Amino acid sequence: MDTWVHQEVRAVCRRRVVAWCLILAGAVLFALAQSRYISNFVSGPFEVGQPELDAIADASTTPRYFVSVTGSKAIDTGIQQITTRKHAGVETGRSVSAAYYALVVGDRFLIVKRAAGMPTIVQGELAAMPAELDRHLFNTPQMQAIRGRFYPYYLDDSSFRVPGYIGIVVALILAVLLIKFGLPAWRYARDASSHPVVKRVAAWGDPVGMAVEARREADSPPRYKGGGWRVTDKYLIRRAPFTFDLLRLSDLLWAYKKVTKHSVNFIPTGKTYAGMLVCYGGAAEVTGREANVDALLTYVAERVPWAILGYSDDLNKLFKQKTQDFCAAVEQRKRELASQAHK
């Protein structure tokens, strides 16, 4: 039967599917926009000589711009790229990060930007010559007189393929995330009954009645809320555009206050507080002011007195390493309290 829980799960998963479709569409459009780079990344560098260089009118549009060029001579222009290091707005040092030299190709000159050395065989990316470089290069009448022999672009021999390798890594990460989150969302959107939350509610014994009750409490003012969670009389409910979760308050195993200290440059800037409510099937982190978190913990202690309250390293270790023993201890407390109530 299609309950409110099914509907919430299906709606969330459909939104996730739409979001992943948009992400994939954006990735495809980006790849299409970078088709020129991808072609050069895969097929380059292309061997070119003076005829091919002479035929290039605009380096920003030429199909083949990742090239390998062999010249007959390298001439130092004396122009360098200086990198300035600063700390707190004060200059702390300078270093030469690159130099420009003229590579003689036939009877013309190709300006090459390189971190070190002046080889006559270079490979890199052809790009339009920056205005500042043009101004420094042709700042004398002698250089102006031979300007026509210089190509209107330059070759940058810095790692051309690095952005491509980064793109491959990003694509692989995207593929892993798609498999891990996108495909399950598509599967759950088609069959909500296979979703863990739906299965959890079904295991409670009365999925229809539970769903009706949970929906009524979800639409009512909560006892406490924070971090996307709503604490009601019987449930812990998390409803967001891309998230839905439902826990029973009676399934609470462990509750404690989580305090997170914040600092900037080792200077304390404040604290944030959250009530951690660990249940069978999941955990809720209800954030809020310290007073509200304390009130929440007092409330759950009254509603679920058999749950373990408070935090210690030993409890944390026991819960992580011996979860079954932890749960067994809680169940034993529950039975003891029930036995005392019947006396």
Image: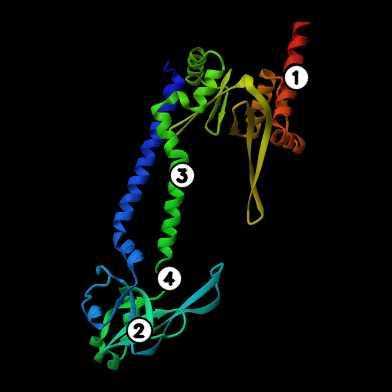
Pick whichever of labels 1 and 4 is earlier in the sequence: 4
Three-letter residue code for mark 2: His
Q: Do the residues labelled 2 and 1 touch (CB within 8 Å)?
A: no
In the picture shown, does residue 41 fall above or below 152? above
Q: How far apart are marks 4 and 3 (CA)?
A: 28 Å
Q: Which mark is residue 332?
A: 1
Q: Residue furthest top?
A: 343
Residue type, mark 3 in image: Leu
- Residue at image position (41%, 57%) is 167
Image position of 230 (left or right of 188):
right
Q: Earlier in the sequence, mark 1 or mark 3?
A: 3
Kindly identify which residue carries mark 2.
136
Q: Are marks 3 and 2 in contact (CB under 8 Å)?
A: no
Task: State the image quarter where residue 40 is shown.
Answer: bottom left
x, y (%) of residue 23? 37, 45
Q: Does the residue at mark 1 contact the one at mark 3 (Cβ under 8 Å)?
A: no
Closer to the camera, 333 or 216? 333
Q: Mark 4 points at which residue?
A: 159
The residue pinned by badge 3 equals 177
Mark 3 neighbour density, 10 Å: few (under 14) some (14–19) many (20 or more): few
Name the front one of labels 2 and 1. Answer: 1
**Three-letter amino acid code of the residue under disc 1:** Gln
